[in-house]
Image (cartoon, helix red, strand yellow):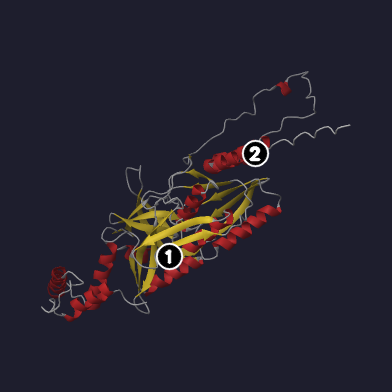
Amino acid sequence: MRTPRFTRTLLGAAMLSLPLSLPAAVDQEPLLPLDDLRTFADVYNQIRVGYVEEIDDSTLLEYAIQGMLMSLDPHSVYLTKDAFEDLQTNTSGEFSGLGLEVGMEDGYVKIIAPIDGSPAAEAGLQTGDVILKLDNQAVKGMSLGEAIDHMRGPKGSDILLTIGRPGETEPFDVTLTRDTIKVASVRERILEPGYGYIRIAQFQTHTGEDVSESLAKLAKDGALKGLVLDLRNNPGGVLRASVDVADIFMDGGLVVYTEGRLANSDVRYEAQPVDDAHGIPVVVLINGGSASASEIVAGALQDHGRAVIMGTNSFGKGSVQTVLPISESRAVKLTTALYFTPNGRSIQAAGIEPDIQVERARVTAYDTSRQISEADLSGHLDNANGDRPQPHERSVNNLLATDNQLYEALTLLKGVNILGLRQKPKPAPVPDSES
């Protein structure tokens, strides 16, 4: 792909000192603000000549490019050869590092979400944490790319992170050991007979196929009465994969559309007219770490009334990044469009608001084992139908204690099923035949 005109001209003016005024015979407006370009060239020359340390032209221009992109938004970045390769590796599902999805905010690196099973997740790092220092080196002033490069390193090596956490009065240190991050994009399990659970940790190229396979595995144990789709702390990933996942649960209709300035930025993604989940009730769990592709899925299913969205507000990353190669070894990841839910809602900086707000909390069930009921009384009458009270399943109580949001999702699915069974129309009485 060609280098954008603006970048080519800017670099040419700085490097070759081309004339900064147009011939008088040319009537058209200049393509670039010449006064501002002159200022840039003057500043560039002052740095070359007067900075305390000598910096070669190539490095200085690379700094200029990085600064230009950093000033646009937290997601537009300059990709060196290593960063470009890392980006491609991340979408395939295996890479080396700490297991963090991060962004830049107010000059600091902010954690969007830790990846399941990674050193960062096991150390208890959370969505919203801010990385203040890396190995006692202040992050303030680093570019996002520089911070990410600092966090990468050989497998088994340690790095010290100084973390600021909302609600905590003092920063704290965490030592992480770098490891190979193998992201299991999709995993599934049965919560209770008839109720399935699918967790998507990250949207990779084949995530749609993986969700279909997980759904088929869950159905082997018997017909599903409901499904929990867990998108919490899912930082997003491949846009096409989010469309594929939403398509599994929809019977046609618009999934998401994008709008931008480039001619190919305006795209509409439609679902196939077949609901592979056969209309089973679905609860989607989201939180502040659910971003980008996660929000596309949640927004589409919410707008079509196909699922109940539960949890807390999502992250609010409603922008599309396009990788634009500028040479064989370098590229620009540039925000080129915004995406919108089927009803026209922009997710950017707003996120998806759940239908039912459920905060993550530590819940302890009361011990009711010592309570006395009628069945415990001496000489009580037996149940006329022979039924005996059944104890609560231990797994449900464990779920309440370990993941109250998932517990609430399962409870809602049970309620929907009970209500659906009770509201099934009774068969019409057969009229007596005339004699």
* On screen, residue 57 above or below 181: below
* Residue occupying the point 12% across, 79% down: 25
Quadrant in the rendering for residue 136 = bottom left
Front-most of residues 83 and 251? 251
- Label 1 is placed on what type of residue? Ser
* Left or right: 291 in relation to 65: right
> Does residue 142 appear anywhere in the picture?
no
| Cα gap from disc 1 to disc 2, whole angstroms | 55 Å
The secondary element bearing badge 1 is classed as: loop
Q: Residue furthest left?
A: 24
Which quadrant is home to the N terminus? Answer: bottom left
- Label 2 is placed on what type of residue? Gly
Q: Mark 1 highlights which residue?
A: 157
Q: Mark 2 highlights which residue?
A: 420
Residue 100 is tagged as: none
Quadrant in the rendering for residue 435 = top right
Q: Where does the image place residue 21, in percent across and percent down from the top left?
A: 12, 76
Q: Residue furthest right?
A: 435
* On screen, residue 285 above or below 292: above
Q: Where does the image place residue 34, in percent across and percent down from the top left?
A: 15, 71
Q: Residue furthest top?
A: 379
* Left or right: 48 in relation to 1: left
* Left or right: 224 in relation to 30: right
Classify mark 2: residues with Cα within 10 Å, few (<14), some (14-19) or many (20+).
few
Q: Where does the image place residue 69, in percent across and percent down from the top left?
A: 29, 65
Ranked by sequence position, the earlier of labels 1 and 2 is 1
* Left or right: 434 in relation to 151: right
Front-most of residues 292 and 347? 347
